[in-house]
Image: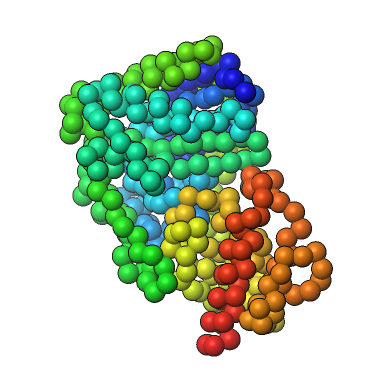
Amino acid sequence: MAVSKAVFVDNPSTNVFVNQGVEASLLERVSAGETVLYVWTNDFAVVIGRNQNAYAECKVELLESDGGLLARRLSGGGAVFHDNDNLNFTFISKSSDFDKERNFNVVQRAVESFGICVERNGRNDLTVNGAKFSGNAYYTKGDCKLHHGTLLLGTSKERVAKYLTPDQDKFTGKAVKSVSSRVCALDTYNSEINRESMVAALEKAFAEEYAEAEFCRLAPFMLGADIVLKWTGFFGADEWRYGKKEDFDFRMKTELFGRPAVVALRIENDEIKSARIYTDALESEKVCTVEETLCGVNLKAAAEGRIVRSGTEENGIHVEADNPENGVEDCSETTPAACAIASEAAKEWYEN
């Protein structure tokens, strides 16, 4: 479907929960034929991926004692340090209008307008001379999609290292070790780069990329206080930020969707009662579906190789339908992933 309306939103708020609330509100209200570019800046905070363990990725107590906030986003990926030198952007549209290439075109054109040569790598990052200045992630809810990312304008590497805890030894054995990318701040390549100049460049590039569409600006307050407050409260809630407190009986290290993962299970009478998977994989919705699929699996059956995808009462994995709330349209990846995890967990559970 052709895009008929390009909406630009520049949020003056620097509160991470308000900014996340506006993002979710825009995702909830986007119309067919419409593409939104939303930009904002957070004060001192660490934002973790949806499926990450807050305490494994961040020095939470130190962060909060120094006045920072811990936040969790809807999308997958890794932990990111935020301050006033970190500009964030989000593209939002219906799935039928979503075009990742055009989104990247906008960001690349904006940065290159400062005389910087931008490259894309395989992990959805934007780089200069091999050094990363922008990480990107994606989220789907129903028939709506968002693509959001960061632009490192000029932050301190010392502050990043102070609060983030990328443990190089936490994923060993079968899992692939995470490789830390070199990072760079854009203002080292052009001293004229700051929030104001980059926002102007993004707005111009957005209007040029969608020249066929009606261009308009939207102020966040026009979304309505009720919807923004609802989502702001959701993102600021302790259970969302820190994760639900639960005692697990079993943990193991593995790999999921090509990324290191830690699987935590609560087991009663040989049955998985709850599952939590900690990972920086980008496929946050699929990770959640794997967690849901694991619940109810009989580990004894799994140990015997009886992991089946069926609608019977036979012990094993039973997938009744897709999960539209998570935006997962098929189980072609999630069911085999859940089967593999269940088999591996059953083997370790009964061996130990």
Quadrant into which the N terminus falls:
top right
Q: Residue at x 58, y 69 (%)?
A: 340
Number of labels in the image equals 0
Q: Is residue 135 visible?
A: yes
Q: Is residue 108 left or right of residue 184?
A: right
Residue ranking furthest to the right: 312
- In the displayed structure, 178 sits above or below 313; it is above
Question: In the image as oriented, which residue stretches furthest toward the bottom?
Answer: 351
Between 3 and 61, which is closer to the camera in this rendering?
3
Image colouring: rainbow
- Does the image show residue 53? no
Q: Nearer the viewer, residue 109 or 54?
A: 109
Residue 347 is drawn in which quadrant? bottom right
Q: Where residue 82 sits in the image (x, y, percent)? A: 34, 42
Name the residue nearer the viewer: 200 or 180: 180
- Compared to 174, does 188 lie above or below? above
Q: Position of residue 180 (x, y in %)?
A: 29, 55
Residue 85 locus on image (x, y percent):
28, 35
Q: Residue 195 appears at what percent x and percent y?
A: 30, 26
Residue under the point 55% across and 75% down = 344
Residue at 58 percent of width and 53 percent of height: 286
> Left or right: where does residue 301 sit relative to residue 187?
right
Q: Residue at x 22, y 39 (%)?
A: 129
47 left or right of 240 in image? left
